[in-house]
Amino acid sequence: MAYREYSSRIGGLNHWLFAQDEFHHLISRPFRDEDYTNVINGSGVVNKEQKYPKGYQEVIIPELKKRSDFLKELKALKDINPADFKVLTVLVGDKDDPKVAASRSYVGMKAATTKLSGLSSMVEEFPSTITAKEMYANLDKWNKDNTISILMFQLPFGGKAGEDIDTTELCNRIHISKDGDGLNQVTLGLMSLAADRYFDCCTPSGMLDLASVYLVRNKGAKMRPDGIASFGGYEVLIAGRSAIVGEPLCNMLKCFDATVLGPLHTRNGSGGKSDKETQHRVYTELSQRADIVFSCMGFHPYNVHPDTEYFFNADMLKDGVLIIDASTSFRKDGKKPYGDIEPSARSKACAFTLETGGVGPATVTKLVYQGWKGMLYQNVASVRKALEDNKSLVLSTFSKLLAEYAGSAEPEAAANAEALYNRAINADTHPCHAVDALEAILPSLMK
């Protein structure tokens, strides 16, 4: 069969990540008095101790620090000091407001993880009396500050600001080159089309990574040249249709060749009916077909089952399903997080995430990683010069990735690799191609 030219993004971090022996993506661990196997490991840390093998976060963040330190070894990049670049989080709410207590804790987690990567963390905190006009003025200043690699608003805002400020309009004013949380609607649209873009929404991107590594390592799926598994041949169910998780995830999976079922939502039905009985039948029929379930509802308004609050029970899932559950709600006692999958249903899964140590750490890691990429975007001319200085390595790396995906010999992919290299160094093309290429060759340069 003739070689088929590839023209999408190529490179990135995942080719390196998925090859790491120390990255134990599947572990056994107890959780709420149950012992589970085949737990997908977003984090091996419990109570700030490395209690379990290294997961997604514990491998990526130290690697970003190593790469940050290594930049000074490259002539074209030696003037970049990662500590000069900030990941900015904006928190709005009074200190005694319980509605922002969880946000404040989450901001602290992001700040600590950011510093471990070699970047700096910046937190701007405002009282609930801040006005939209004042916030826009601050945002204009942050957008123009080249030392801020990405910025994000910790939502929801507390108090009066939460009622008065249109946060959708506010997020749409974040410059897309700094939109590290993927909240600008332009970013959302580009991501849903799998088009050239600076960043992704962190949660769906992290969910895709966790599923990809399982499919590549355990199911023999091909890894695409952009570092995502090919979902071709898999029926994939998305439960939830939020603007920043369910919907973009659904659209991205279509671009990665999945057969997409759903997304499930409160108006699902059949034949023009959406009564409870019809909904339950539709939910069950679709979920029993799914090879992979991405669940991201986060709360439970459905009352599908009389005997459990969870959306998915064992009867709804087929044997061997892969479960990536991003939901976290505190509906039982207000303290412990719960997901969408009933614990007894996990016995049917080939692998699954738990409510803690799964998608959450992947989301935070993605955020910090995008801050690291934001630093490179701010210095893209230097990145392109580094690629020109290492042309032969870029070409050989690209040829290998393309040949592996196409199932061909590397010489057959050489012309394709040359074209993609020229795209990466061209100042008129999107910076993502240069940054992806640099990330692909850094492991070889660092040896």
Image (cartoon, rainbow, N blue to C red):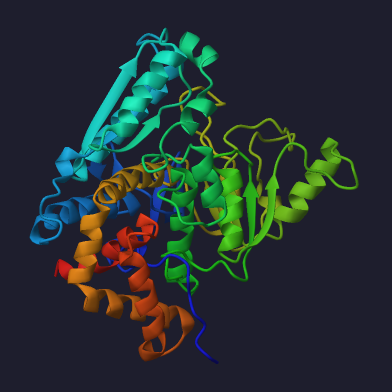
Q: Quadrant of residue 235?
A: bottom right
Going 62% across and 71% down the picture, which residue do you hit? 233
Q: In which quarter of the image is the C terminus?
A: bottom left
Going 37% across and 62% down the picture, which residue do you hit? 433
Foreground pick, 415 / 158 = 415
Q: Quadrant of residue 240?
A: top right
Going 20% across and 57% down the picture, which residue do you hit? 382
Left or right of 154, for residue 441: left
Q: How far across and how far down the image is residue 67, in percent?
A: 18, 56
Asked if 137 appears above or below 178 in the picture, the reply is: above
> Does the image show residue 70?
yes
Asked if 233 appears above or below 74 in the picture, the reply is: below
Foreground pick, 71 / 207 = 71
Q: How far across and how far down the image is residue 435, in percent?
A: 31, 58
Foreground pick, 192 / 59 = 192
> Does the image show residue 48?
no
Say how many tags the image has. 0
Asked if 149 appears above or below 13 in the picture, the reply is: above
Q: How far across and how far down the image is residue 72, in percent?
A: 9, 55
Q: How far across and how far down the image is residue 397, in percent?
A: 30, 76
Foreground pick, 96 / 403 = 403
Going 36% across and 30% down the picture, which residue do you hit? 106
Q: In which quarter of the image is the N terminus?
A: bottom right
